[in-house]
Amino acid sequence: MRLHISHTTRYSYNQPVPYGLQQIRLTPKPCDSQAIDNWTISIEGGREECAFNDQHGNRVQLISLDAGQTETSITCTGVVDTIPTNGVVGLHSGHAPLWYYKRQTQLTQPGKLIRKLASDMPENPNAIDRLHELSTTIREAIGYETDRTDTGTTAEEALKVGHGVCQDHAHTFVSAARLLGFPARYVSGYLMMNDRIHQEASHAWAEAFVPEIGWIGFDVSNVISPDERYVRIATGLDYDEAAPIAGIVFGDGVESLLVTLQVQQ
C-alpha cells in the first residue's frame, strides 16, 4: 500500500520565547514491512542543530527555536510503501541487545495489578497466540477513552483506572510481556484510518520478540497486529524513548499546541 502522509505540529506562545530546544523522532524506520519513497521535514521558527541515530536506530534531530519566536512549526511530508507481513517486523538488529528490552522503566514498572494480569495468563506453547491473548485481555481491562490519562500516566495507573488511549495500552502490553519473558518495546507511528483522513494525533502500539520469527507488532487498541495501514516511526523501551517530539522552552509565556495529520492512499 502506498501511503501519503502530512503531519504538522505547531507551537504558539503568547510571549516571545528567549530559548527553546526540541528533540524530534519523525523519520520512518526502514524495515521488512515498509520502504520510504521520500520524506522531508521542514522547520519554521527554528533550525536543526544536529542529527543522529540513537540506540534503537531512530533518527533523532535536535531543533533549536529562534530567539523571540511566538510560533514554531515542524512539518513532515512523504510517501511510504507498506507491505502486509501479518505484523512481523523482522529479526533483531541495532546496537541494543535483546535483554535490554526486558528492562522495565518508570512508565512500565509493574505493580500488583499488572503482575496479577500477567500471572493469570494461561500457559500456551504457541508464543504468538499467547501474546494475542495478552493483547485481548488488556483491551478488555482498559477501555479506550481520551482525556483520562496523559503522557506521564504509568501502565499500572492506567490499568487501575480502567481507561486510557493507545499509549496506555502499549505500555501495559510491554510491561506484562516482559513479565512473561518476552523482550518488548513501544512503537510510535501512523495509522491510516478507514473512516477519515484528518487525524488529531499519531498512533502507538507494541512489539514483542518471538525466537525464530523476530519482532511482531500488537496494536492493543484495535486488537490486531499491524497491517499495511501502519507506518513505524520510532521504537523504545517506552513513550519517552520513542516520543515524536519532546523538549523544553524557557520563558514565562503560555504554550498552545495544534497538530494536523493526514494519512491517505
Image: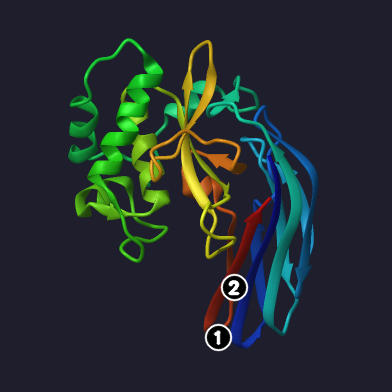
Residue appearing at x 36%, y 36% in the figure: 173
Question: What count of labels does the image hold?
Answer: 2
Against 53, residue 7 (above or below) is below
- Please tell me whether mark 2 sits on a helix, a strand or a loop: strand
Coloured how? rainbow
Position of the N terminus by quadrant: top right
Q: Amino acid at mark 2?
A: Val
Against 11, residue 89 (above or below) is above
Q: Residues within 10 Å of mark 1 (few under 14, many from 20)?
A: some
Q: Who is closer to the viewer here, 141 or 47? A: 141
Against 76, residue 141 (above or below) is above
Q: Amino acid at mark 1?
A: Gly
Q: Residues within 10 Å of mark 2 (few under 14, many from 20)?
A: some
Residue denoted by label 2: 249
Are dots 2 and 1 in contact, CB under 8 Å? yes
The answer to whether residue 68 is left or right of residue 239 is: right
The quarter of the displayed image where residue 70 is located: bottom right
Q: Who is closer to the viewer here, 262 or 255? A: 262
Residue 35, how many percent across, how many down? 74, 36
Q: Who is closer to the viewer here, 123 or 175? A: 123
Residue appearing at x 72%, y 85% in the figure: 68
Residue 104, how many percent across, how many down? 38, 35
Residue appearing at x 68%, y 30% in the figure: 31
Residue appearing at x 32%, y 46% in the figure: 155
Answer whether residue 208 is visible to the viewer in this image.
yes
Residue 73, how many percent across, how many down? 69, 71
Residue 212, how many percent across, how many down? 53, 10
Residue denoted by label 1: 253
Answer whether residue 106 is visible to the viewer in this image.
no
